[in-house]
Image (cartoon, rainbow, N blue to C red):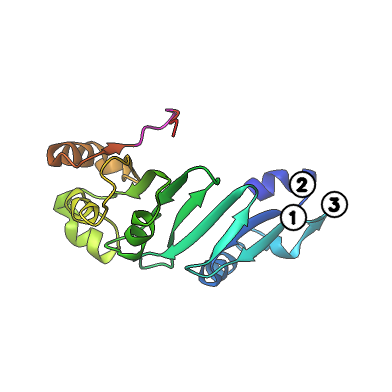
């Protein structure tokens, strides 16, 4: 919708950084001339409106003033976690994932890590659904956090399914996970 709404006013192309698998998914299922136009093939008066910058899991690349390192995570659909650095601090973001090791290894190696954002989608009673859809429950997240050695680094929980939010919050709070906090929409976080 963003590209569609701004199409005629874009002065330079919107750049989508993605793996080859994700680019193929976007082109086949979203920008396919059935749901949305294939914007990567279109131009406005200023030129192209959308372009892809392909990367592979494990690649490090620049976006503006940020350095981003990608790492494959465990998810049914191709997904990556990221370490984003501005040269002063780094932040880890898992994206959708189930149990994973490389993300935690990457975060543990960083002395400048200021925060981690990790998903916790389903309540514990839906552990079977979480497993087949490659997501985490509070119990699964607790096991994942045992891999994380930076005890003072805040861990913000994201991607809670709205239908189960209250239950997930209650379960997370009952587990008393170190430094784990539910990310609040609208709150400004100063890292």
Residue annotated with mark 2: 10
Which range of residues does the magenta coloring cover? 183-187
Q: CA distance from mark 3 to mark 1?
A: 8 Å
Q: Is residue 96 left or right of residue 55?
A: left
Residue in the foreground of this view, choosing between 19 and 155 = 155
Q: Which mark is residue 162?
A: none
Q: Position of residue 134 (x, y in %)?
A: 30, 63
Q: Is residue 26 left or right of residue 129?
A: right
Asked if the residue at tag 3 contacts the one at tag 2, i.e. Cβ–Cβ closer than 8 Å, the answer is yes
Q: Is residue 129 left or right of residue 97?
A: left
Q: For mark 2, does the 10 Å Cα neighbourhood hold few (<14), some (14 to 19), or many (20 or more) residues?
A: some
The quadrant in which the C terminus is found is top left
Q: CA distance from mark 2 to mark 1?
A: 7 Å
- For the point 23% across and 63% down, the residue is 131
Q: Position of residue 58 (x, y in %)?
A: 47, 68
Looking at the rendering, which quadrant does residue 40 occupy? bottom right
Specify whether residue 30 is in view: no
Residue annotated with mark 1: 49
Residue annotated with mark 3: 46
Q: Is residue 156 left or right of residue 60?
A: left
Overall secondary structure of the magenta stretch?
loop
The residue sitting at the right extreme is 45
Q: In terms of sequence position, does the residue under pointer 2 or pointer 1 come before the other? A: 2
Q: Position of residue 53 (x, y in %)?
A: 64, 63
Image height check: is 38 above or below 160?
Answer: below
Give the SS element for disc 2: loop
Asked whether 184 falls inside the magenta stretch, the response is: yes
Asked if the residue at tag 1 contacts the one at tag 2, i.e. Cβ–Cβ closer than 8 Å, the answer is yes
């Amino acid at each position: 919708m963003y590209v569609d709404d701004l199409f005629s006013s874009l002065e330079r192309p919107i750049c989508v950084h993605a793996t080859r698998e994700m680019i193929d998914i976007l082109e086949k299922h979203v920008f396919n001339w059935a749901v949305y136009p294939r914007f990567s093939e279109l131009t406005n008066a200023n030129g192209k409106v959308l372009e892809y910058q392909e990367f592979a899991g494990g690649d490090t690349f620049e976006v503006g003033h940020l350095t981003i390192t990608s790492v494959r995570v465990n998810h049914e659909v191709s997904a990556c976690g990221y370490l984003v650095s501005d040269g002063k601090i780094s932040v880890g973001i898992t994206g959708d994932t189930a149990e994973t090791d490389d993300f935690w290894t990457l975060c543990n190696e960083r002395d400048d890590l200021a925060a981690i954002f990790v998903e916790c989608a389903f309540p514990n009673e839906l552990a079977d659904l979480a497993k087949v859809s490659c997501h985490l429950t509070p119990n699964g997240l607790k096991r994942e956090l045992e891999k994380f050695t930076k005890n003072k680094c805040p861990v913000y929980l994201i991607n809670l399914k709205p239908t189960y939010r209250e239950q997930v919050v209650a379960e997370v709070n009952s587990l008393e996970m170190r430094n784990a906090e539910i990310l609040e929409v609208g709150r400004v976080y100063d890292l």
